Amino acid sequence: MDKRTFVNKVRERLGDRFASTPEESIRAVFQTLHERLPEGQAGHIASHLPKELKTEWELGRGATLRRQISGTGASFDRDEFLERVRQRAGLPTRDDAVHATRAVFATLQEALPEKDRQDTAGALPQPLRGLWETAAVQGTGPRPDPAGQRYEDQWLPSEHVETPDQLV
């Protein structure tokens, strides 16, 4: 997938009137995900990105030294992940951060082979893993605004939800 296609898919998922540009959302999510993943998995993802998007991905290399010492990514949970995305993309709300994260996750998954999608899920703690695994379910178009329900209540897996592999 080339950069233009990637950005257009994120734009389509975000909707035309989203609070940040697709490029800002991609940069924020890439940087935060790269920080969170072990270096080996971050490298696998980078190998599937077009050259023009690798620059955005590499912004998350701030945790590289720690990863080289420990072999793991930075340790933060879903709430911290979403807060970092919100701040980096200049988004006004947590719901916007959830929507941006899901849009970028779903598009990134389209660019990755199945093994790397699974390995990325396995490298993330629950419930952040749940956000990764359910991102493609969101579909495309503007963020839904269900009456009487916060966006994150509809689209964020519960911290205590069992994933399909746990139900076996």
Image (cartoon, rainbow, N blue to C red):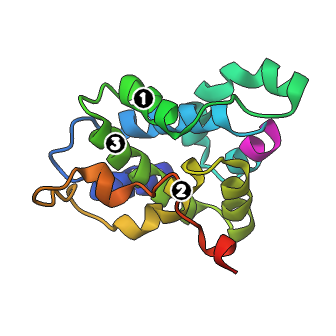
Q: Is residue 42 magenta?
A: yes
Depth check, front residue: 5 or 31: 31
Give the total of numbered labels.
3
Disc 2: which residue:
160
Q: Residue at x 48, y 64 (%)?
A: 134
Asked which quadrant contains residue 67, the reply is top right
Label 2 is placed on what type of residue?
His
Point 55% across, 41% down: residue:
53
Identify the residue at horizontal 45%, vertical 58% (top origin).
Answer: 157
**What kind of element bears circle 2?**
loop
Q: At which x and y percent is residue 144? A: 19, 59
Q: Is residue 28 left or right of residue 47?
A: left
Percent x, y of residue 7:
39, 49
Q: Amino acid under label 1? A: Glu
The quadrant where residue 57 appears = top right
Alpha carbon of mark 3 to alpha carbon of mark 1: how far?
18 Å
Q: Going by the image, does 60 lie left or right of 148?
A: right
Whether 81 is drawn above or below 165: the answer is: above
Q: Which residue is mark 1?
A: 83
Magenta region: which residues? 39-43
**Residue 74: percent from the left, percent from the top?**
69, 28
Which of marks 2 and 1 precedes in the sequence? Answer: 1
Q: Earlier in the sequence, mark 3 or mark 1?
A: 3
Residue 102 in the figure: left or right of residue 93: right
Please state which amino acid type lies under the numbered disc 3.
Answer: Pro
